[in-house]
């Protein structure tokens, strides 16, 4: 288990935002020079200024956070960006999780798995697989898909600047419900077969 409660999910999403949203360096420096802010606030600003930022190197097309793993659909703009991004994200989250849980050692079982997307159908089915993944959790996690995946961005229920759904939504109709992304995601395929197409 890598997410034990809502706080863990929230921290992970905050880290995604900090890495993927363009950094407002000018605004941060202005806040830093404000004499009315305290030491703790200045320390937070300095950490944000030092933090790696991948807004110009990576587009996050879709995501889903599960209790024991996560899926990210990433368009890499610069070579090696995905590797640097995931190393930063996973190291930072593991440090947070270990501090919170008073544990030591490795949090993630292994190096992340990555699959090169080589066709448009694979891209579309991969987004669908990621968004349907929380449905495997059952009734106990009924709100999971809405809270901890990018599906609300695809259905225009939530605006998140660091998620880029339009790249995939451009393949679908906005007017014809039968050819919409919603209809595509709701199709009932054999989920095990879908895994072999998009992941393995």
Image (cartoon, helix red, strand yellow):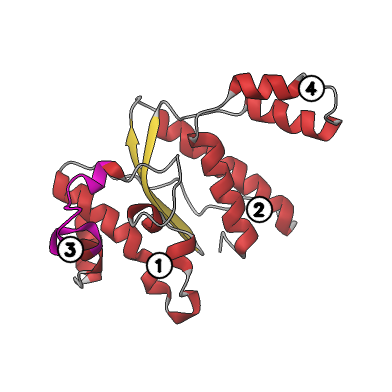
Q: Position of residue 200 (x, y in %)?
A: 25, 54
Q: Which residues fall within the magenta stretch?
A: 167-182
The reply to whether residue 200 is visible in this rendering is no
Q: Nearer the viewer, mark 4 or mark 2?
A: 4
Pick whichever of labels 1 and 3 is earlier in the sequence.
1
Note whether residue 157 is visible. Answer: yes
The residue singled out by tag 2 in the image is 97
| Image height of 138 relative to 26, above or below | below
Mark 4–mark 3 distance (CA, rounded to whole Å): 52 Å
Q: Residue at x 75, y 56 (%)?
A: 102
Q: Quadrant of residue 146?
A: bottom left
Q: Residue furthest front?
A: 175
Disc 2 element: helix
Residue at label 3?
177
Q: Quadrant of the N terminus?
A: bottom right
Q: Nearer the viewer, residue 57 or 176?
A: 176
Q: Residue at x 32, y 65 (%)?
A: 132
Q: Nearer the viewer, residue 125 or 95?
A: 125
| Distance between mark 2 and mark 1 Cα atoms | 22 Å
| In the image: residue 80, left or right of residue 10 | left
Q: Position of residue 54 (x, y in %)?
A: 47, 30
**Label 1, on which residue?**
134
Pointer 1 and pointer 3: residues touching (CB < 8 Å)?
no
Q: Is residue 170 magenta?
A: yes
Name the residue tied to disc 4: 34
CA gap, disc 2 and disc 3: 42 Å
């Amino acid at each position: 288990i890598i997410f034990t409660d809502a706080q863990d999910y929230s921290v992970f999403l905050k880290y995604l935002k900090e890495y993927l949203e363009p950094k407002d360096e000018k605004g941060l420096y202005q806040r830093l020079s404000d004499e009315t802010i305290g030491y703790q606030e200045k320390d937070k600003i300095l950490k944000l200024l030092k933090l790696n930022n991948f807004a110009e190197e990576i587009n996050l097309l879709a995501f889903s956070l599960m209790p024991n793993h996560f899926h990210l659909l990433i368009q890499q703009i610069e070579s090696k960006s995905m590797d640097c991004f995931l190393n930063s994200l996973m190291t930072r989250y593991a440090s947070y999780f270990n501090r919170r849980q008073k544990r030591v050692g490795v949090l993630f079982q292994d190096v992340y798995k990555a699959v090169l997307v080589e066709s448009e159908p694979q891209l579309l089915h991969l987004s669908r697989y990621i968004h349907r993944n929380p449905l495997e959790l059952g009734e106990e996690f009924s709100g999971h898909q809405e809270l901890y995946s990018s599906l609300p961005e695809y259905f225009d229920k939530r605006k998140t600047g660091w998620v880029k759904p339009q790249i995939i939504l451009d393949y679908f109709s906005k007017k014809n419900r039968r050819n919409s992304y919603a209809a595509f995601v709701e199709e009932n395929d054999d989920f095990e077969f879908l895994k072999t197409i998009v992941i393995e």
